[in-house]
Image (cartoon, helix red, strand yellow):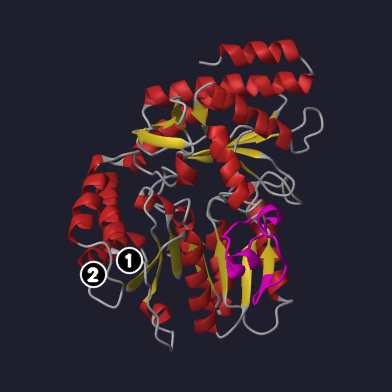
Amino acid sequence: MSGELYERHRAVLPDWLALYYERPIEITHGEGRHVWDADGNRYLDFFGGILTTMTAHALPEVTKAVSEQAARILHTSTLYLDRPMVELAERVAELSGIPDPRVFFTTSGTEANDTALLLATTYRRSNQILAMRNSYHGRSFSTVGITGNRSWSPTSLSALQTLFVHGGVRGRGPYAGLSDAEFVKACVADLEDVLGQAHGQVAALIAEPVQGVGGFTSPPDGLFAAFREVLDRHGILWITDEVQTGWGRTGDHFWGWQAHAASGPPDLLTFAKGVGNGMSIGGVVARAEIMNCLGANSISTFGGSPVTMAAGLANLTHLLEHDLQGNARRVGALLMERLRAACAGLDVVREVRGRGLMIGIEVVEPGTGRPSPEAASAVLEAARQGGLLIGKGGGHNTSALRIAPPLSLTAAEAEEGAEVLAAALRTAQAMADGSEEVAEDVGRSAP
């Protein structure tokens, strides 16, 4: 069945539309932290549809909200008053930390970042954008232009002039050997130097507090607060891309920017993914003066639809009432501890990093430290065979596994997933060592 569907997929969809696994799987249904494929195989889901199934698969509160709203009306557009949209906007505005906030809903994180760029460049009357090296902000023409990760940036053409600065990757690059304080100081000096090359005023800095596609890398806490002091001197706006880091996933904070809060909240905040738990919701929060700077009419046909807003409200309410941020902190710490223990002594692993339930494992060629996409793919395949779904990513000089389960993950499920992942990593190590017999044995032993 999956093979036949794969052939049909290849016949009508683009070649560049990536699929995981040598034999791609069709996921047919899910419940809690588990999903099933078309062949009846059950998997523990440690990737959540790319960090999107935030609370749980088939969460009863969300499915009920969607069903009840769909039975009333599916669509109206932003040309009419929309009670669920207003109610969700009120909740998001209050949680954002931005003073005098306004919220605009979109259908994706790409579109949210697109809107933030439109607002910032219009408000500042400049097409110059600061972005982080190794970053990813979406697949539209404008967001590809500010993406500092060549694997996800297929063209250099852009209406924006983008200036890339250091700071998103702590463990590699020219500043890797510095202490945290020295690292921040060097990155601030780099920012100042880049601004010295800019023509006129720069519109904004856009940054992910934890880089998602880039392999779950992050700077020391406080870097963006130090950047903010420089930005404020020049009147430059700060856009925090919380598409992957928002809603408590990092455990320590509800938003990623709060790890850099010494200089206050950002000017604009973009969000998506988890708030909809699979429904298409994205958006921007900005100070009123910035949000209202557009001098032309604008609407959204599908952003803020009654059904998606009802789902978002139910999902956000569940997350807050069940303290899933706290669960991400507690269970994430347990999972990190187990994974670091499992990776100790494995030459194929360079680093285990992350916060909360946003964990990255950087894999390399043993003895060289060079990135190993082959090892990452081997772990991905072995984990699937053991009943675990994970993701992968990385920049031009890294290859990383991405672990981001729903925030309701239990301690027992964390232990189970860590055991499967440990076996998969031993498989990759055995392959790197050239030991086929050990690799096969490890694969068989995976639960």
**In the rendered structure, which amino acid carries the disc numbered 2?**
Asp
Of labels 1 and 2, earlier in sequence is: 2
Image spot of residue 408 (x, y percent): 34, 36
Residue to which mark 2 is pinned: 82
Image spot of residue 360 (x, y percent): 58, 38
Question: Is residue 328 depicted above or below 14 in this figure?
Answer: above
Q: Tell which residue pokes out farthest to the bottom in this image.
A: 295
Q: Residue at x 53, y 73 (%)?
A: 117
Q: Nearer the viewer, residue 228 or 351?
A: 351
Q: Measure how far apart labels 1 and 2 are at the Cα level.
A: 8 Å
Task: Determine which quarter of the picture holds residue 400.
Answer: top right
Give SS at disc 2: loop
Q: Is residue 197 found left or right of 246 in the rendered image?
A: right
Q: Is residue 327 found left or right of 295 in the rendered image?
A: left
- Dot label at residue 304: 1
Give SS at disc 1: loop
Question: Is residue 161 depicted above or below 258 in this figure?
Answer: below
Q: Residues within 10 Å of mark 1 (few under 14, many from 20)?
A: many
Proximity of marks 1 and 2: CB atoms separated by less than 8 Å: yes
Q: Residues within 10 Å of mark 2 (few under 14, many from 20)?
A: some
Q: Tell which residue pokes out farthest to the right in this image.
A: 368
Whether residue 266 is visible here, answered yes or no, is no
Image spot of residue 195 (x, y percent): 68, 74
Task: Determine which quarter of the picture holds residue 430.
Answer: top right
